[in-house]
Each structure stands twice: as structure tokens, then as C-alpha cells.
Amino acid sequence: MQVTDGTLLGGRVQHAQPAAGHRTGLEPVLLAAAVPARPGERVLEGGTGSGAALLCLAARVAGLRGLGVVRDPTMAALARANMAANGFDGISVIADDLLAVRPDGVFDHALANPPWHGAGTASPESLKETAKRGAPGLIAAWAQRLAAPLRQRGTLSLIVAAPALPAALAALAAAGCGSPAVLPLWPRPGRPAGLMLVQGIKGGRGACRVLPGLVLHADGGGFTAAAEAVLRGGEALTL
């Protein structure tokens, strides 16, 4: 597999990824910003890919420990190399099916950018197809697996396309992660949100909250100041 070398968070994080097929977008960076981890806590990620989300999270939270799970062994090896290149030795990555994994110990937070496409033309790139397309019920199955090792009051954070929001909320509820918060991601002012950050709390019983959201791009071009602070400055998003 050919890879290209790049960076995340305005150059703070080294990130190699496949030269062809599925390429990292804004989603993992935004997802990492939404995880309310504290130094020394443990995190679990499903669908780690080349490790972008865990890399961004570890860059923001000192001493983070965790586990990333990705099905493709080549991607797992690339994610491990990315962790090593950035000195994040507390994060391990394994090649396995998330639904078959039974990790040791308890985790404080879990996160995923799950495949949600269920129809349409398949991509000829196998890595891209795996990253984007999931069978019916996959989000619910992933939520159950990610929530299982969470401590009480631990968080489960997902980033999904807007059409998958109902499935994501139902999945959190079925996994025992209540008090859901939804943060819409608006591509530009006045445009419908294309992506949603969704977060539940294990054992939470509060009502669903829809937050003001984040506008990503300004009308004149470029990122908004608020988006720039997250995507390049590494600031957290509070859900």
C-alpha cells in the first residue's frame, strides 16, 4: 500500500494515510474534539482507520491510554506506525472485527465514525467501501459493542451524516447511553447540516439536547474562526 505523509491539527500531528482509496476528512478531527477525555483516561475507538481521531485526541489530552480497532491488518499497521511517529505509546491498535472484540478492563470513553451508507453504487476501492458502507443495523451493533466496556457515566461519541441521525440516537438508547446531545455541523451559514456529532452517557437518563452547532466554512471562503480553533488549534468541542 502506498502512503502519503501529512499532518493534522495545523502541523502538530504527523499522519500518514493511504495514497488511494479512503482519505481522512474533517470527521475524525471533529469526533476527537467532542470526546471529553481527561489525562490518563482510557478510550476505545471502533473503525480506527489510519488513526486520525486517536492521534488528535492524544495530542489534546496528555497521558491518554486506549485501544483502536480496525478490521484491515494493513490499516492497523499504519495506525500503529502513526502512533509511534508521534510518541503516543499509550495507544494500541489491533486488526479485528469490532463486533468480535472483547477488550480487557474498563474504558472511560468510546468513539466511532461508523459506516452508514446502506445503498448506492459501491466504490471500487475496498478500503473506501469498508469505511463508508455498513449493513442495516450496523450502527446499533457498533454502539452495543463500544458501550459494553464503558464505566457508568462514561461517554459514547459518534459522528454520522444527517440522514443517519435517527439510527444513531436509537443505537445510543439501545446501548444504555442516555442523555443524548446532538451538535449539528453546518457546512456554511444558512445551509442544512450535513454531519452530526452525537454523544450519550452510559446510564444517563436526561432528555435529548440539540446544541447550537458549529459552522465550518465562512461565506467568503476558508474555515470560520470557531472551526479553525478546533481543526487546526486542537480545541475541544463541549457536548
Image (cartoon, helix red, strand yellow):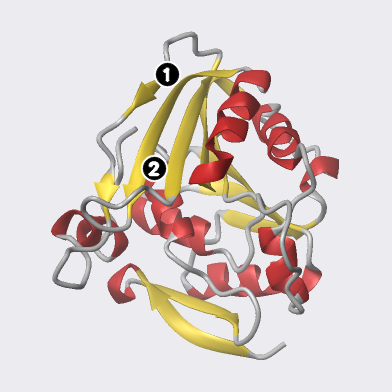
Badge 1: residue crowd in 10 Å (few <14, some 14–19, many ≥20): some
For the point 64% across and 85% down, the residue is 20
Give coordinates of residue 39: x percent, y percent: 39, 41
**Residue in the foreground of this view, choosing between 190 and 172:** 190
Q: Nearer the viewer, mark 1 or mark 2?
A: 1
Label 1: which residue? 208
73 vs 110: above or below? below
The single residue placed furthest to the top in the displayed view is 205
| Residue at (53, 36) in percent of width and height | 165
Rendering coords of residue 44 (x, y %): 61, 43
Residue that numbered label 2 is attached to: 34
- Quarter where residue 84 is shown: bottom right
**Splitting the image into 4 quarters, where does residue 10 fall?**
bottom left
| Up-down relation of residue 189 to residue 74 (above or below) | above
Decide which of 61, 27 is in the foreground and name it: 27
User: Seen in the image, is 162 located left or right of residue 11?
Assistant: right
Helix or strand or loop: what does disc 1 sit on? loop
Is residue 26 in view?
Answer: yes
Which residue is the extreme one toward the right? 100
Asked if one can make out residue 75 in the rendered structure from this viewpoint, the answer is: no
Q: State yes or no: discs 1 and 2 in contact (Cβ < 8 Å).
A: no
Residue at 30% in and 31% down: 211
Callout 2: 10 Å neighbours few (<14), some, many (20+)?
many
Residue 124: percent from left, percent from top: 76, 79
